[in-house]
Each structure stands twice: as C-alpha cells, then as structure tokens.
Image (cartoon, rainbow, N blue to C red):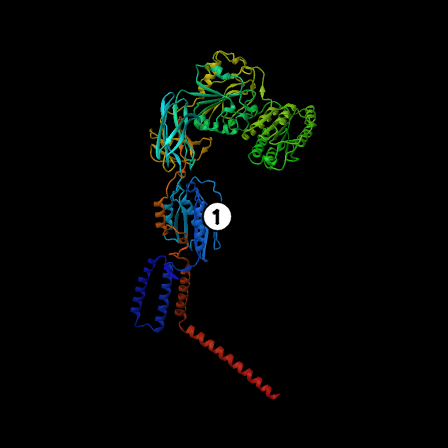
Amino acid sequence: MDLRIDMPLALLLLLPIFMYFGWTYWRERQRLKRSHITVLGIRILAVICLVFALAGPYILLPIKEEQILFMVDRSASMNGTDGEMANFIEESLQSKKDEQLAGIYSFSSTLQTEAILSKTLKEVPKFTNIEATDQTNIEQSLQLASGIVNSKKATRLVLLTDGNETKGNALEFASKFKGSNISVDVVPFHQPVSTDVSLKSFVTPQVAYVGEQQQLVTEVHATAANKGELLLYENDKLVHREAVELAQGSNVFTYKHTATAEGLVKYEAVVQVEQDAIFENNKLTSITMVQSEPHLLIVNGYDSASPIAAALGKQSISFNVVDAQSLPNELSSYLQYNAIIFDNVPGHLVGEAKMNVIEQAVKNFGIGFTMVGGENSFGLGGYFKTPIETLLPVEMEIKGKEQLPSLGLVIVLDRSGSMYGSKLELAKEAAARSVEMLRDEDTLGFIAFDDQPWEIIETGPLNNKEEAVDTILSVTPGGGTEIYGSLARAYENLADLKLQRKHIILLTDGQSQSGNYEDLIAEGKENGVTLSTVAIGQDADANLLEALSEMGTGRFYDVVDEQTIPSILSRETAMISRTYIEDNPFYPTIYNASGWNTLFANGVPQMNAYIGTTAKQGASVIAESEKEDPVLAQWQYGLGKTFAFTSDSTGKWTGDWARWQDWGTFWQTLISQMLPSYNDVAYDVRLESDGSFVITDPTNEAAFLDVVAVNEAGEELETQLEAISASQIRAVVQAEPGLIFFRIADEDQAIFQAGISVPYSAEYELRPVNDKLVEELTKQTGGSVLKEPKEVFREFTKKGADRQNIATWLILAGMLLFFIDITIRRFGWSFFTKSKKKEQLVENKTTQAEDTNVAQLLKGMKKR
C-alpha cells in the first residue's frame, strides 16, 4: 500500500494556519486552561484534515493480475510469417502464470480479435482472414489495444512486427503511455527473403503534343539477377514489348514513343518474370497531357455507317466512331475526348456502370454530351432514371399530354437460389423503376417464382406506387426454377382485362421443365397479351426465351452484364406504356439562342418526327415542336454542356433537315457549343510522401479553386482542401493505388485536367525490420526487444494498482472534529460529564429495582 498526493502545493496552506494558531496560543497561554488547550488541538486537527483533503490524497492498493496482449502484424509485408509468429506465441504461453491474463489480436490497417483477454488461454487459435492487408497502422492498433485492457492493471503489449508502418505515427502515440501501466515489447519478424522484381518508378512527360516523340523511363529493381519482359501500354493498348536482362539492384530502361492518343493519356508499365515474390509491385501508371485539336467520340447505334460522321465530312473536327458495346469502362478513356454524341444508342447495351463514368466526365471534367433521337434512344432506349437522364436537359417522361393508352403490365421475376446477390437486387431495382414509370390508373402485377409461382402483387390497378415498390424490393431468394406455371398465371391474370395494351416481362437466369408454351402464348395473343423475355447470365435457356419472345411478339434480351437489367426493363415499359414517337410533319419553332440564329436566318426546314420528352426546369429550349415538345434543348450540367436532339440523324425523322444545305453546319454548330472551355493556366499537381496532393496555382489564387478528384471507375472521391499559401492548397484524398483524375476550375468555370498515379503501397516493397522504430518504441514505453518466447511473461517492473481516494474520509473527519469543537464551546465539558452522571443514575435505579424484585421473590418462597 502506498500513500500519494495529487497536489502537494496545497499543503503550503498549513504554514499560515500553524503560524496563526501558534500566535494565538502564545498570546493567550497565561489564561488557557487544560480544557482550552484540548479544544485548540481538536480545531487544529480538523483544519489539518481539510487541508490534506484539498491536496488530493489517495492510497494505491496493489493489483496482482497482469495483462499481456499479443499484437500480430498480418499486413502484406509480413506474408509467410504467420506460422512462425504463432509458434512463438504458443511457446511463450507455457510460461504464463495463473494470475496473468493473455489475449491475441492481429492487425494491418486496423485491429481484430483472435483470442480475447483471459486467464485460460493456453494455445493459439487459427488466425482469421484479413481482407485489407495493404497498410500497416501500428498507431491505430496501439490506440485500440489500450482501450481493450484495464488501465489499472500492469499491461504489456507484445508487438510481433517488422516495424514498417505505412500509415499513422506509432512513436507519437506511444508517448501517451508515459506514466501509465502500459509498456510495449517488440518481437522483430520480417518476410522471408525471396526473389522479387519490382517497378520503382515510371516517368512520362507531364505535357506532350500529338506526333511528338517522348521518353518513357522505367526503373526496375531486382533482388537478384533475372530475366524478364517489360510491357508498355498507352490507354490500355500495348505499344511496346521487350525482353530485358535484369541485374541485381536498379535497372533503368528508356523507350522513345511518338504520342498518338490525345487528351489525358494513361501510360502503364508492367514487368513480368517467371518467379516473383510480390506481384502487386510489378505495375505502375503515369499520365501525360497530350495536347491537340478538339476530339469527338460518336457512339453509333445503327448497323450501318454513322450518319453524323457522314454529315460532318472529313474536313471537320477530328472524331472516332464506336458502337455501344465498344465503350470503355475507365474514365481515362473518355478524358481524351472533348465531346460525346449518343446516336440512337440503346441503354441496355451501355450499362449503368459506363453511364456513371460518362456522367462524371461531363459533370466534373466538362466533356460535352449530346443524345440524338431514334427508335432506341431517350425513353425508348431505356434511359429512365439513369445517370444519362440525369445529365440531359430533358426528362424521359411525357407530362401533361393527351390521353395515353390503358396498360396492364405483369413482371414475372425469377427468385431462385441462383439469382442470389447482385442479379436479384438489380432485377428488383429494375422492376421498381418500371413501376415508377406507370400511371396511377395503369394495371400492375408482380409474380416471383422459384419452384412455384408467388403472386407478390395481385394484378390490378396501381393505387399506391410507393407500397408496390417497397413490396417488390422486399422479395428474397428461394429454391428451384419453374417458369411455365408462373407464365401461365401471368397470362391468366391479364386475359379478361379490358385494356388497350397488355404486356408480360419475364426475367430468369435458369432453365425450367418443358410446358405447352405454344398454346399458352397463342391464346394470350388472342387476348392482346404480348411477351418479352430477359435471359440473365450464361446458364439461362436463351434458346427457349428467345423463342418465347418471338411467339409473344415481344423482344428478347440476352444479358451478360447485370448492370444493364434496369435499362432493359425501363425500355420495355416505355415501349408499351407510352406513345413516344410523334410522327406528324411540322416546322419547328426556333427561339432566340446565341450561336443558332444565323443558321436559321433563311428559314427552318420541315421535320417528320421526334421522340416526346419533357424539358427540365432551367433547360434552354432552342427548337420546339407544334405540341410544345423540345426538339433541341441544352443546359449546363456541372462543368459540361449537354444537348438533347429528339429527332434522328438518318433523315427518316428529320425529313428536309437531312437534305438541307446547312445540315453539316448544324452538326458543326452543335459540336462547337458542346466543347468545354479549358484553362490555359498550368496548375501543378504533385503527390507528397504523406499521400496528400499539393496543387500550385501560379496566379496566386489557389484559395478560389474548385477541386474534384475522381478515380478510374468514375467514382467521385471525398476530398478535403487545406490552404497552404496564396499559391498552394493541399488536397487530402482517400485514394487507392491507381489513377486519380483532378478537375480544377477557377471562378470563371474554366477547366484544367490533371491525372496523377498513386503507386502501390509500401507494403509491397521488400524491406528489412525497421530497427529504429522498434528500439525507440520499446525505449519510450519501458519495454524490451524480445528474442526468446519465455521473456514475454517475465516479471513486471511496474505493478498495477487500484487508486483509492481518501479525501472524502478526511473531509468527514474534519467535519466531525469541528462538530465536537462547536459542542464543547457551546455546552462546555459538563455536556459530556452530565451525560455520564445521567447514565450512572439510570444504572443504579435499575440495580435497585432488580434487588427489590429478588427480595420479594425470596419472601414469597418462605411463606410456602
């Protein structure tokens, strides 16, 4: 037991108190009686108790229990050491004493439990799987471990690690252990030395020009002499392959390449060898801004040559023509273009993943976008509630128009076990999106089937859209697959309904037992019911489903990319629920719009048809039909300018426009309006060693910049900006290794693009044990660097203790002494002596009474 004081300076109050009482005693010593001296002593003792209470006294009671926490580094740099570390812990546990608690935790970027702290731990359990091993965060692991243990008990954190932290600062946090019961021991382990080849750097010019020869410089590090192959890619296209001889240490290779791609061009270097310890360090990327004339991407939805390309001619803007299925997935592939045109492109051939990337390219990088009409475009193309509809100046829905045909729609959805996961979730989302396109007076039915049909929503009027959507989204996967009975139920439900259009959409990823489909569908056709089918995945019976759609006079969709399911269902719903195509010839009304007036100075040609849409609030309608539907509309979406041209490009719908002498000029004008305004200021973006990005503005207006970071998948990354100076800002981005694209815009919305390569984590480098961190960490916390397992459970130099505060007891003692002091001064000592006399008197009376009772009892006995 140990007595301690928190605030010893408070004891200085005793000096003036002793001086006062000493002076009082000296002055009154001649008149003081013995009783007065006693009272004075009681008063002094009470004051001393209160002063000691102010000083915060406490007693430390020893705690016998001790805590040992094993913390196992399971990051990528420790691959191959799990067994060795488990053996070390297993052997050390043999030295554990009964009063000691032990626990095992593993960490990489965070801490997870392997065995909780207990007295019964005797052996090491099988380590659980760790998903994220690309970082080592010793600081966070120490922080979490300190929250697990009892801070009153003696605690030893035993780190089994190579000490190569890639995140956080362990030494900075460990300083908080000073004065605590926690010490840190380290058992050094490192990845077994193996043959490894890694890319240390890959450098390309920041800026180049089309046709300019540029140097691509690659540095390869080899732990031993080896033979390999170096591959270089430009926008994922192989441009160089070379067999290389690798000497031990650093090897530098330079390749001269003439830039052919334009815009932000991604270059990638890959090194390959037969035997390699770490594959993650074999690839690096770099970005070069290849400056050139504007470049256009035309996505052609026709089987024939692009009508827009023909209208533009060879002397126009540089352009590429691709089909929808050839569209790339990466953002870098779109940033080489200045504008994109979708010409009669079905949404289900694009998929929402690619739509999301395009939406980011438009919103944050100023890429222009135009959708051109046709039978596979706008609402008929399945773009309802997609990212493409979000960026366009028009909505796919037709609002406030004449009476539309009455509709009955039944969705038959496969909920078998094979649909579990993203397939079922996307299918449910697609069905819910279709419901949102229906009117309240339309009829809806929803059947989900496994080995039998389940009528989730009975076929009837759609009274409550929200309730219907919630019901559809709540469907869970079930058992087998039985298509015929479910399809028969759908036909039966629609057969007798008095509706102008009745349609069934069947979605399945499997196969079913045969049935009499011919008679079922033939009878349905007599009742006006049509059928479309969607085959999801390679296991679906595509032949059967395609035959069913042909018999049912509907459409068949063979889905490989699950992301396209929502577009397919919205397309189907649009085709049967709305009269989208307006095919009465008319002369569009042209409104006063900058850049367009001179084009129509000599009149406006006649147009045959267009797809009905609704202009969004804030959109600018340039050309309008007689029914006040937008034919050509534009608006600003983020930094990009987007257009909707609801007629087609072939002449079938545009009529006289396609034969108009200014037809080519019309497209040139549209494209020039789409092109973004780029900033001539060359901002410098650099990756710092701490993982942040520093952006330098030579105009000293960095504080006014708008910065957005986007990854290759088109996902906008959370970005925190911090001003460093008038010319620099720091951007902290949670980015994974790979390419990060920065869009920088000034107050005038002028755009600057930059791409930065985030290299692979330092976890994937072969490095020795960080002896400096290990030694400093143990020294700072009073721990040791361990070599033998038995050292783990050695004696603790600092024992645990439970702190018991005694200030309250001192205050109570002081109050009691003051009460005695006041009582004596008020009543004198006679209060206590009178009490004693009174007690004696009561005792005597009691004795006399007892003697009288005994005498009377003896007297009575004699008489008998």
Residue 855 in the image, given as x and y percentages of width and height: 55, 85
Q: Nearer the viewer, residue 256 or 312?
A: 256
Q: Residues within 10 Å of mark 1 (few under 14, many from 20)?
A: some
Instruction: Say which element carries label 1.
Output: strand
Establish if 85 lies above or below 251: below
Viewer can see residue 565:
yes
Q: Quadrant of residue 522?
A: top right
State the quadrant of the N terminus.
Answer: bottom left
Q: Is residue 29 above or below residue 492?
A: below
Is residue 639 among what the camera can see? no
Q: Is residue 499 left or right of residue 742?
A: right
Front residue of 491 and 751: 491
Residue 138 spot, x, y in % from top left: 40, 45
Q: Looking at this view, is 228 or 127 the one in front?
A: 228
Q: Quadrant of the C terminus?
A: bottom right
Q: Is residue 134 above or below residue 785?
A: above
**Labels in figure, total:** 1
Q: Amino acid at mark 1?
A: Glu
Give percent across and percent down for residue 264: 41, 26
Residue 308: where, in percent of width, then height? Answer: 49, 17
Residue annotated with mark 1: 114
* Residue farthest bottom in this picture: 863
Snapshot quadrant of residue 35: bottom left
